[in-house]
Image (tube, rainbow, N blue to C red):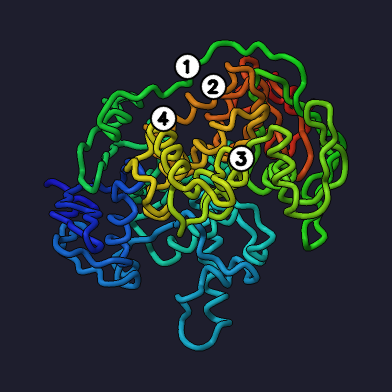
Amino acid sequence: MTTAPAIELKGISKAFGPVQANKDISISVQPGTIHGIIGENGAGKSTLMSILYGFYKADKGEIFIKGQKTAIPDSQAAIAAGIGMVFQHFKLVENFTVLENIILGAEDGGLLRPSLAKARKELAHLAAEYELNVDPDALIENLSVGHQQRVEILKALYRQAEILILDEPTGVLTPAEADQLFRILDRLREEGKTIILITHKLREIMDITNTVSVMRRGEMTATVKTSETSPEHLAELMVGRKVLLRVDKKPATPGETVLEVEKLRVIDDKGVERVKGIDLHVRKGEILGIAGVAGNGQSELLEVLGGITDATGTIRMNGTNLPLSGKGAHGQSRRHAGIAHVPEDRQREGLIMEYTAWENVVFGYHLDPEYQKGMLMDNAGIQATAQEKMDRFDVRPPHPKLAAKNFSGGNQQKIVLAREIERNPDLLLIGQPTRGVDIGAIEFIHQQIVQLRDQGKAILLVSVELDEILSLSDRIAVMFDGHMMGERDPAKTDEKELGLMMAGISDTKATQEQAHG
């Protein structure tokens, strides 16, 4: 007797106005397996999973759960059908306990005490069975990101989910936390649960899944057994052409020091010290990568160097001290010093979304003499310059008069990169260069960064993607809780050692633990 698929979607289509997000998609997921779904941004992965979880209603198509045709008009219906979803951005109440979050929306009647007692007992059972240990009385705001994710999984299991959807689950985890998550997923698979994993990380797909489906432009292009494919083949299926997954670069030939930072401290608006007396330097012709889990001071470091945030300490650029106070007033002084800045959040800090591409291409540099025509700005000249830059950086569509909000994330990033790199800076500050960027655009962006380095420029790179840090950097420094944990040569380290340092284990101890395997 053949077992029915845990999930079967037949002919699913969904449009948002003129945009066809899903087009006649059919997919079958076998029970007790981990099924990966990959695709570029805008390929339709999240829309498809939102239909399965009841957030959207398909324009046409059918959903079958364990062989039974099932209507899923909302998330309550999805939960009733045994489907749970762990979102990329957790849906937890920060000032509630773990236990309170677990039962929220699944209480037994009007009295909380019996619900809490029942949940506590069930939670202990689930934690033991699936290695999902977490203190039921801990406040969510006091838990690490990895433990918060466990709470989300426990929430789904408490509601009797047999099918779990995880959307980019490792985006905010250390390597050690990601490894632990995969051990949990393995245990869930062994216990007969069915898991759908949405991720852009091809190595994770290869490591953990049984089967992988590839989406491109709203259509399902292929479903293959993971054991019968490769990262290169999957990348080609995603993009429609061969993609170079490794960064092709020669060894660095560093020159004199461009940037010197000494005893830098940053205290935020709430009085919390975010950067705690760090020192660093960057030389001509090299890429210094700053690794670390988000929230450990890297963002504040970039903002200070870019002239956005106040600090104390010393920053020297080509031997000249830069001002550190007068919040928001020093972006122009940084640009005059030869610093260009690609911020971490392109939409909030890199672009004005309502403005056109040509306007965004000159922001920060709009007072330069080359963009003036008498008393007015030379708009025609700026538009022509913007067109050239958009062509060079392969911005699609190449229309300078289109508003920034109408470009995809990857093309928005290219607009920011074109503006900053084309200024020929002595130092490029670049935060999360490929966050939310398609795999084809990642290849292009990495090439631009390496070319700048090869022209003798200094680059300070901040990224939460360890693969990116390891492949692009000539030196790697690790930040944890506002401190520099140490520095490594990319050729003489690996993700395990860097992961220990990212988790706050001291430089010396990380070396010792690495040596002992």
In primary-sequence order, the first of circles 2 and 4 is 4
Q: Is mark 1 in CB contact (under 8 Å) with mark 2?
A: yes
Instruction: Give me the C-alpha separation between circle 2 and circle 4.
Output: 16 Å
Q: Amino acid at mark 3?
A: Pro
Q: Is residue 92 above or below residue 385?
A: below
Labels 2, 3: front one = 3
- The disc placed on residue 369 is 3
Labels 4, 1: front one = 4
* Quadrant location, the C terminus: top right
> What residue is drawn where x is 88% and y is 41%?
313
Mark 4 sits on what residue? 392
In primary-sequence order, the first of circles 1 and 2 is 1
Labels 2, 4: front one = 4
Label 1: which secondary element: loop
Q: Amino acid at mark 1?
A: Asp
- The disc placed on residue 448 is none
Label 3: which secondary element: helix
